[in-house]
Image: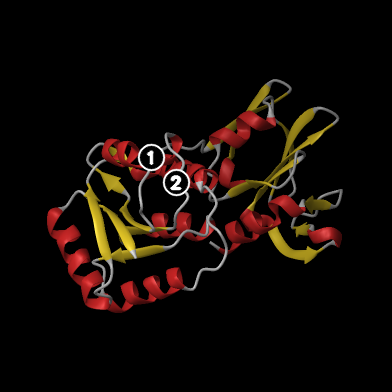
Amino acid sequence: MKVIIVEDEIATSENLIFLLKSIDSNIEILKVLDSVKSVVKYFSSPNEAELIFIDIHLGDGISFEIFEKVNIFIPLIFTTAYDQYAIKAFKLNSIDYLLKPVNEEELSEAIEKYKSRLAPIKPINDQMQGLLKFFHAKNKVFKKTYLIQIRDELIPVKTENLAYFFIETGIVKGITFDNQLFIIDKKIEDIEGEIDPSIFYRVNRQIVLNRNAIVNIKYYFNGKLVVNTNPKFTERIVVSKAKATHFKNWINA
């Protein structure tokens, strides 16, 4: 097995090499890379790498940015210091990861999982986009209040109190958990971009749900899902087959 290690801390990379050799003496370390730039350069040319161990935070950026610049077709195992936010992102995007400091037992399990893979590897750029979105969101300040105008009065409504946003006859509206209806003078796409994606999810073109409004999820035909909420929405809330797995992962994160 030919391995690339992407790590900017020498002690950490040396420890990982030691553990890998302890687990399987046939593992060959092709290269230790320490930056986004060096990884992009390496994978821009033909190489023999079969597996990558890669840290998240490198000296010149977040490693997810690599996949905006080059396609990589081999498995990745991320290494990261414990960060609940990071773990949620990995689980949501179905990415393998190891917590630092890496221990031999977990590393051995990861190697065995890699060896047991039968399906061909596809480029994971789409998954990396999801991870980038999560990590950028970590540092983003989300909208906490919507100031709603009703006649000559302005009413502050806390974002966390909104059960869902939806479009009705071209108008965006919000329903609070105590079932108050407000008209929001914004496009739903703009709202989606300014609210916390760990709390709100756009299940389809019509509606953005607060996870706390979800009562249950039922299987529908052709791999679709139906979501029931409280307060109850006036129409059936359907999640497409294409979004179903991602939506379930989001709920389960």
Find out whether the residues at labels 2 and 1 contact each other: C-beta distance under 8 Å. yes
Residue 91 visible, this orientation: yes
Give the image quarter of residue 215: bottom right
**Foreground mark, 2 or 1?**
2
Q: Is 117 left or right of 161, judged from the image as shown?
A: left
Residue 106 screen position, x and y as percent: 33, 75
Q: Which residue is mark 2?
A: 72
Task: Look at the picture and state if 3 lies above or below 143.
Answer: below
Circle 1 residues within 10 Å: few <14, some 14–19, many ≥20: many
Residue drawn at (26%, 63%), measured in percent from left and top? 28
Q: Which residue is mark 1?
A: 66
Residue drawn at (76%, 54%), measured in percent from left and top? 241
Q: Is 229 left or right of 120, judged from the image as shown?
A: right
Residue drawn at (81%, 50%), measured in percent from left and top? 233
Give the image quarter of residue 105: bottom left
Residue 129 screen position, x and y as percent: 50, 42
Mark 2 residue type:
Ile
Residue 80 visible, this orientation: no
Q: Is 216 left or right of 48, judged from the image as shown?
A: right
Mark 1 residue type:
Ile
Residue 153 screen position, x and y as percent: 66, 24
Q: Quadrant of the N terminus?
A: bottom left
Residue 226 screen position, x and y as percent: 80, 58
Please name whichever residue, 177 or 125, is drawn nearer the observer in this view of the structure.
125
In the structure shown, which secondary structural element does the residue marked by tag 2 occupy?
loop
In the structure shown, which secondary structural element does the residue marked by tag 1 occupy?
helix
